[in-house]
Image (tube, helix red, strand yellow):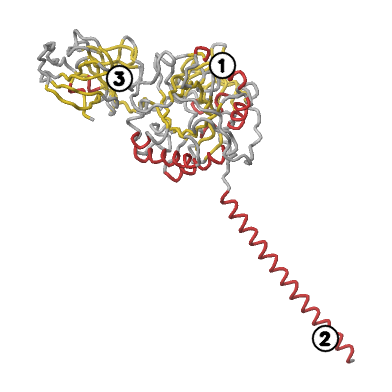
Amino acid sequence: MYNVNQKRKWIIIVGVVIVFVAVGIFFFYKSISHEDNTSDKKDNSQIIETNQVGDASIDPENIDEQEEGTSINSSQLNVQQGKSNGIDISKWQGKIDWNKVKKSQIDFAYIRIGYRGENGVIYKDDNADYNIQQAQKAGILVGVYFYSTAINQKEAIEEAKWTLKCIEGYSISYPVVYDCEGYKHASSRTYKLGVKERTANALSFLNTISKAGYETMFYTSLSDIETHWDMKDIQGKHKIWIAQYSTKIYPQKAKPDYSGQCDAWQYTNKGQVNGIEGNVDMVVCYFENKKAQPKNKNADVPKASVPLTDQDKIYSSVNEKVTAKSETNLRTLATTKSNIVTTLKNGETVTRIGIGSNGWSKLRYKNKRVYAITSYLTTDLSVKQEEKEDIVNGQKFEAKKDKVTAKDQVNLRASPSTSGKVVGTLNSGDFLERVAISQNGWSRLQYKGQVVYAITSYLSNEVIQKPQQDEPTQDDGFTTVNEKVTAKSETNLRDKPSVDTSKVVYTLKNGEYVKRIGIHSNGWSKLEYNGQIVYAISSYLVNE
């Protein structure tokens, strides 16, 4: 009996010990697991996701712009010391044969590394890694640009850090570029930002990139450079890249119409380069760089897949009639860089034969295959064009019907911008019909059967008495001054103080400064421009 009780006692003791050991082991592994999970979460919070690919519908660059540049083939370019010829590209150029591009007078390429979608998420350009790797393999120097829709400095810094992570393993020999456009469209998430906020975002991005040891550059258009950005905060700290399309382009024209800092000029969006299907943006840099080394030679470089050609892209076959929701361009290729065949308006129909995963539709128009952005089309043929705001170049126009003439002489332009193509001039006494006016200072006119634009402040409903046109004698009556002036918007500089017998030497635009050396009571100012004496109407000028 004693032995039995002792045996039971030992069994109970051993059982209790086993239970305590088991419980101890359970809690030990649970705590380790908790620490591992916490560590994983902490590590994951530091990971920057660089492989998300966005749908075409949220890509802010997938906007069909109207402005067209002058056509040029890269074979027309020449090599000039201190300058370099290049292009800027994104997934919209499709599959590029970089070896052919290298043989086409191209020194460098600015490749879109990514963008922030209209949904606020950062995405990598579908073809970024392929384009960087193949361009470098072909011997083309590479810079990158990020298309930003940051609405605050925190987002801009996030975009910069994301970009740095993507490029650390690559040889980035040309600048890293901050590109923010589309803010004049009401659909853009950056639409409500002011000049100071927009500029602060740009600086946050550029300064973050610069601190990492990369050369930086800021991109904008000539029409926006003075009105939508605080350039004094950017110039001198970062390189400046200006886009301006004009009839006369590089290399016939050396630089854009801007007197401030300009390190690169995008002079057309209709360049033809062997190896690239369709049109491409052409860029000249007023500097030459050499091949740089990667910032992190141990960084993992993604394995890039070959982009699909247009023939390879999956278009779901359909056979249906479509019309434009409002109006949209029909193009030769599925890219806004391709040529416009025609403009489809609401109520006009074409046959859609394919819907692509790239955001484009394949259409049949007059026995030709053409393409249009899918989101601009509808199969509901009964839909009437919605009454929409009349917005051109970010300016809202309202209907106005009257007759106007020039106070002196004013340029008539193809678009409401001082960088718009000049299609004619209106002289005082000659009247045109005005059909709309914007709050930004532009009027829309009818001229020889076409729509043109002119600066409203230079127009009048009646002939304005001109300043006295007596040519100055040796004692010309000008009161001596010494000050810098610019145009309120734009004004002609003439070789004589007369609008009838003088020759226009140059058209001075807002932001371009000249020295005023005299003011006359007859309404004229005497100026110094490029070493010569010129004259302009005083009321069209403003002090620095």
**Which label's residue is closer to the chain start, 2 or 3?**
2
Distance from the alpha carbon under mark 1 to that under mark 2: 94 Å
Q: How many dots with numbers? A: 3
Distance between the Cα atoms at labels 2 and 3? 105 Å
Element marked by disc 1: loop
The amino acid type found where label 2 is placed reads: Lys
Task: Give the spatial CA distance, label 3 vs label 1.
Answer: 41 Å
Choose between 312 and 298: the one closer to the eye. 298
Label 1 Cα neighbours within 10 Å, binned few <14 / some 14-19 / many ≥20: many
- Tag 3 secondary structure: strand
The mark found on residue 533 in the picture is none
Residue position for label 3: 444
Q: Is residue 312 left or right of residue 330?
A: right
Q: Which residue is mark 2?
A: 9
Q: Compared with residue 66, is residue 300 higher up or lower down, i.e. above or below?
A: below
Q: Position of residue 246 (x, y in %)?
A: 39, 17
The residue lying toward the viewer, choosing from 475 and 75, is 475
> Where the N terminus falls, by quadrant?
bottom right
x, y percent for residue 211: 47, 42
Pointer 1 residue:
104
The residue at the far bottom in this view is 2
